[in-house]
Amino acid sequence: MTRDEACKKIHDIATLELGVHETPGPAATARIVEYAAYTTLRATSDEIAWCSSLANYVVDNAGFKGTHSAAARSWLNWGVVLDAPILGCIVIFDRKDASNPNAAHVAICDHPDISNGVIRTIGGNVSNQVKIDRSPITKVLGYRAPF
């Protein structure tokens, strides 16, 4: 399997999760709790930062070992560094938060063309759901692939 094929597999699995969303109130969406089981946090609520949980779920189900951390920045130490995005690679973003200098977001590349200064990704916990998002590449901390 090539790197491109591996990342495409990650992308294909992420695409299947589009539309999963949090349950308002004290109840939790079972699928999001399932994502959390792929991290050491093992949360039982969907009222958490769960972008890394989704990434771990997707990567593990593609046949690779994720970080198993609920921290988005943990992906900066995973796999191999890519100089540019490819379909299905992991994208780590800085997320400015005055109360948390380590705040970040992690998602899967949905469209690697960044010529317009924006990258399109599939991410968890984006407006409380798994959805396609567009972010400025100036927020990107790194791109990673399993090998």
Image (cartoon, rainbow, N blue to C red):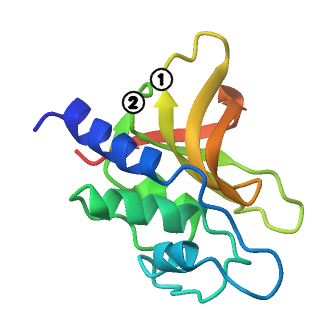
At horizontal 57% and vertical 68% (from top left) the residue drawn is 71
Q: Residues within 10 Å of mark 2 (few under 14, many from 20)?
A: many
Where is mark 2, residue-wise? 87
Q: Residue furthest top?
A: 115
Which amino acid type is shown beneath numbered disc 2? Leu
Q: Is residue 23 above or below residue 103?
A: below
Q: Residues within 10 Å of mark 1 (few under 14, many from 20)?
A: some
Q: Is residue 117 above or below residue 127?
A: above
At horizontal 67% and vertical 38% (from top left) the residue drawn is 133
At horizontal 38% and vertical 41% (from top left) the residue drawn is 11
Q: Is residue 124 left or right of residue 86?
A: right
Q: Mark 1 or 2 closer to N-term?
A: 2
Q: Position of residue 29 (x, y in %)?
A: 62, 77
Q: Is residue 89 left or right of residue 131?
A: left
| Element carrying mark 2 | loop
Q: Is residue 46 above or below residue 89?
A: below
Instruction: Please state which of residues 10 and 142 is positioned toward the viewer in this rendering.
Output: 10
Q: Quadrant of residue 38?
A: bottom left
Contact flag, marks 1 and 2 (Cβ < 8 Å): yes
Which amino acid type is shown beneath numbered disc 1? Pro
| Element carrying mark 1 | loop
Q: Is residue 138 left or right of residue 14?
A: right
Q: Position of residue 136 (x, y in %)?
A: 71, 28
Image quarter in which the N terminus is found? top left
Give the distance between the C-alpha atoms of the residues marked 1 and 2, in whole angstroms. Answer: 6 Å
Image quarter in which the C terminus is found? top left
Rendered image: mark on residue 112:
1
